[in-house]
């Protein structure tokens, strides 16, 4: 019998820009040590705000926050972005955390076979979060932005097209992005 259901959540995808270029010249175990420390930082930041790290995928995370904690979740994602950037800079890594977040309905529960069953989320809400266009920093879908209270909303500005919201301090093209 399936143990999954539909629920509205804030879904966030994080990953580091320039990660592949950064780790290409490093030993796998050195990369694993740094990423293991980053996983601890990310998990502590997310869970302290009522969220859950669904999974780590290399340098990426899939994270969710319950609908009643969207403001706390977005603030945690902002905090994680700053902390992760400091963390990488302290290690001499030239990469920055990119966050894309969407608020919507997902299927959540335990998926998999036999002893490999684990908590996961899937569906349109997750797909939208993955497909958000971002030039860096923290990007919110319109649906996520609309869930925010006025104090947290003030930390974002409209970015088009398509309409997304980015941190006030982020430019449309981050300072570390290369122009072609």
Image: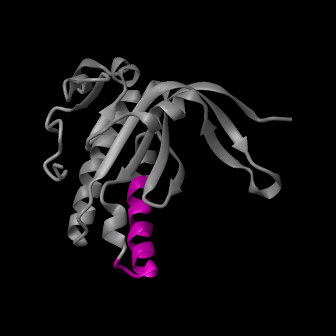
Does the magenta-highlighted stretch encompass residue 34?
A: yes
Q: Position of residue 174 (x, y in %)?
A: 17, 45
Q: Residue at x 28, y 48 (%)?
A: 81
For the N terminus, the image quarter is top right
Q: With 112 as the anchor, is 177 left or right in this view? A: left
Identify the residue at the far right of this view.
1
The residue stretch that appears in magenta: 25-42
Q: Position of residue 167 (x, y in %)?
A: 21, 34
Does the magenta-highlighted stretch encompass residue 88?
A: no
Identify the residue at the far front of this view.
180
- The one nearer the camera, 53 or 178, is 178
Q: Residue at x 30, y 60 (%)?
A: 18
Which quadrant holds residue 170?
top left
Q: Residue at x 31, y 69 (%)?
A: 22
Residue 3 in the image: above or below residue 174 = above
Q: Position of residue 165 (x, y in %)?
A: 27, 27
């Amino acid at each position: 019998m399936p143990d999954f259901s539909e629920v509205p959540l804030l879904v966030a995808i994080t990953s580091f820009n320039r990660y592949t270029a950064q780790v290409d010249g490093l030993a796998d175990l050195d990369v694993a040590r740094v990423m293991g420390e980053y996983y601890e930082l990310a998990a502590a930041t997310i869970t302290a705000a009522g969220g859950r790290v669904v999974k780590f995928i290399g340098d990426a995370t899939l994270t969710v926050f319950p609908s009643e904690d969207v403001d706390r979740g977005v603030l945690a994602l902002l905090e994680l972005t700053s902390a992760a950037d400091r963390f990488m800079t302290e290690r001499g890594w030239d990469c920055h955390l990119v966050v894309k977040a969407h608020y919507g309905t997902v299927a959540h529960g335990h998926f998999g076979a036999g002893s490999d069953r684990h908590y996961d989320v899937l569906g349109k809400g997750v797909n939208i979060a993955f497909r958000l266009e971002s030039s860096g920093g923290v990007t919110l879908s319109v649906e996520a932005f609309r869930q925010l209270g006025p104090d947290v909303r003030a930390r974002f500005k409209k970015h088009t097209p398509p309409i997304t919201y980015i941190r006030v301090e982020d430019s449309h093209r981050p300072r570390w992005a290369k122009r072609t």
